[in-house]
Amino acid sequence: MAYYVNRNIKMTWWERLYLPEIIKGMGITSRHFFVNLFGFVPYLLGAKKERPIMTVYYPEEQVQYPIAYRGRPVLAQNEDGQPACVACGLCEIACPAYCIHIEPSENSGKQNQYERWPDVFNIDYAICIFCGNCEEACPEEAIFMSDDCEISMLDRKQMLYTKEQLLTPVADLQKRIDFTRNMYAKWNY
Amino acid sequence: MWVDLAITFVKILFVLAITVGFFAPVLTWVERKQSAIMQDRIGANRADILGFTVLGLFHIIADALKMFTKEDFIPQGANKILHTIAPIIAVVPALLTFAVVPFGGQYTLFGKEVNLVISDLDVGLLFVFAIASLATYGYVIAGWSSNNNWSLLGSMRTASQMISYEVTMGLTIVGVLMVYGSMKLTTIGAIQEDFFRWGLFLQPLGFVMFLAASIAENKRIPFDNPEAESEIVAGYFTEYSGLKFGMFFMAEFIEMVTIGAIMTILFFGAWHIPFLPTATLLGWFDFFGTTGSNLIVMFIQVGVFFTKIIFFIWLQMTIRWTLPRFRYDQIMKLGWKILLPLSLANILITGIVILVLN
């Protein structure tokens, strides 16, 4: 539904005086000013008080990101220490930026060995656009978007993460796994 | 004679120290911090020396270092001489205005009458406006000599805005002159010893109009069209860098102090505390002797004067961080169609009231 903004507002005589409305506005801003300036006083006197300043001292202080946040994609590591990935290559195809590189390896006839697993699994975060398509495409619940966004580096080559760097225990990703199950089930895939 | 010269020298040093040395740098910090606090943010606090940040006060030092070490750039096709002297022309009037601004009354120190004003001109008020309007040249020359279209637009806007609002400013002053009957700033200050003769009560309309016009003269929001960032990059100082840019910046902040000082003297009781005449204050500290009591009263009144200036700076900052920018036609409309008739009406009403009361 489109919004229609009425741009022909007739101002009252009081508003057209301009000065009272300015003083009203300045009242609001200076109220914020004084509340923030002396807001620590009741806090010092022992009163429990909400902090009016919402800014966070970022590197020292951090906030919990919402579970829907898409940070860097990571590989889920199951209890055996192996990736849950079966190297099907769907995420590689789904990736719009072509940042994933997979070289599969398969069972050569040995007992108790995985049927198929990625020998090389690289994600280049310098190319990744954090769209989450790989997570959506994955049929094995192997790749997930974590809440880690602090991946800036001084060297572009360091941003190419290999399989060992990408592996993250499933236990750490449990919330995100539940979230994706919930989300994609709703969309009826 | 040498003593007089020495006293004048000390007064000049004091004024320079307090404007260039204290207000101009500290206001850069105040501007950041106050805007942050008003908008529920924390504000500048990252510059640290050995881990101490002191509320971000070290940003002043960081700023100064940045200004000094930056490349001094003159664009291709610019008029080098004018480009270099423009910031000087802009900053000198801002400083010169303080020559006639009294920052205290008259005191008897060591058997000598000391008048706390560098030069007690009979036409002090006119001198202030004559010098303040000289600053326009600095801005216009800066814009023209930069060989940049944005700069030229900015300087044109500056010129037209300054001319429009100087009319209002001058006419507002006429009302003040009629009330006090003097152009000497020291006399105007001395008259306001009586709380009910403050300009604020005698000329309430003049006070508001003078505030608006002086903010427009200083080109700060809501009248910052000459340097509107979202429209014409940075206006007349687009092509300036390093210390020259810093001089324009300093001129703006010193002008804020000057406006505060002029407002305080004309409308806000100068160096007087309400209901406390100087004689009463002198009586309180009488047991220190003439010089001692005069010294104490001098410090108190100079302190009061600068407290009032700080209040006006706070007011200007609050206005700057509350209101959005006017459109260009709105500025012209406000200047010529509203403030000019109002200031004329103000003169008329003041004249009638004075005639009736006498």
Image (spheres, rainbow, N blue to C red):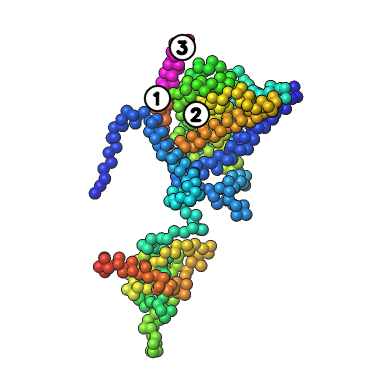
Q: Which mark is residue B357?
A: 3
Establish if B332 lies above or below B22. above
Residue at 48% in and 51% down: A46
Q: Residues within 10 Å of mark 1 (few under 14, many from 20)?
A: few
Q: Chain of mark 2?
A: B
Does residue B1 appear anywhere in the picture? yes
Residue at 38% in and 76% down: A85
**What's the CA distance linking mark 1 and mark 3?**
28 Å
Percent position (x, y) of residue B237?
Answer: 53, 38
The magenta-colored residue range is: B336-353
**Labels 1 and 3: the sequence-earlier one:** 1
**What's the CA distance linking mark 3 and mark 2?**
30 Å
**Labels 2 and 1: the sequence-earlier one:** 2
Residue at 47% in and 30% down: B216
Q: Residues within 10 Å of mark 3 (few under 14, many from 20)?
A: few
The residue pinned by badge 2 equals: B214
Establish if B157 lies above or below B204. below
Find numbered disc 1 in the image and state the secondary structure of the residue it sits on: helix
Indicate the quadrant containing the N terminus of chain B: top left, top right, bottom left or bottom right.
top right
Q: Is residue B277 left or right of residue B156?
A: right
Q: Chain of mark 1?
A: B
Which amino acid type is shown beneath numbered disc 2?
Ser
The residue pinned by badge 1 equals: B338
Does residue B76 appear anywhere in the picture? no
Percent position (x, y) of residue B247?
Answer: 59, 37
Q: Quadrant of residue A115?
A: bottom left
